[in-house]
Image: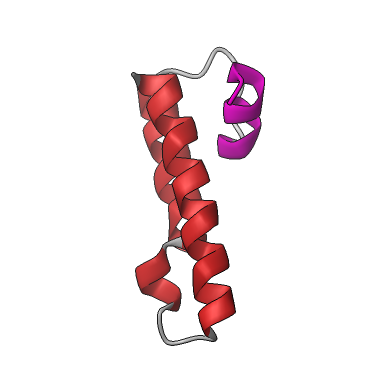
Amino acid sequence: MTLERALAILGVEPTADRAALDAAFRRRSRACHPDKVAHLDPEFTALARRKFEELRRAYELLTG
């Protein structure tokens, strides 16, 4: 994953500080966290899991 892709996934600017990254991660993870959609169709749950993992990798790249 590139830095540009990670920034786009989180929806933040390249100058974002740690607090902005944390807030963006929390905001975006609410929409696709697998536990939030576990009651839905298994295909949707799998999609949410993939999206959340992508979001987590982007966050780790930007904060690590």
Quadrant assignment for the C terminus: top left
In the depicted structure, whether residue 12 falls above or below residue 24: above
Task: Report the front residue among 9 and 45.
Answer: 45
Image location (x, y in percent) of residue 36: 40, 73
Labels in figure, total = 0
37 on left or right of 13: left
Q: Nearer the viewer, residue 6 or 11?
A: 6
Instruction: Look at the image and give the residue range highlighted in magenta.
Output: 1-10
* Of the pair 37 and 14, the residue shown nearer to us: 37
Q: Is residue 22 above or below residue 55?
A: above
The residue depicted at 48 percent of the width and 39 percent of the height is 24
Instruction: Identify which residue is drawn at 44% across, 35% down.
Output: 57
Find the residue positioned furthest to the top: 15
* Identity of the residue drawn at 55% across and 12% down: 15
Compared to residue 36, the image places residue 39 above or below, namely: below
Q: Main secondary structure of the magenta part?
A: helix
**Quarter residue 59 falls in:** top left
Residue drawn at the location 44% of the way across and 21% of the way down: 62
* Image quadrant occupied by the N terminus: top right
Residue 4 image-quadrant placement: top right
Residue 28: x and y, percent?
50, 50
Residue 41, x across and y down, in percent: 54, 86
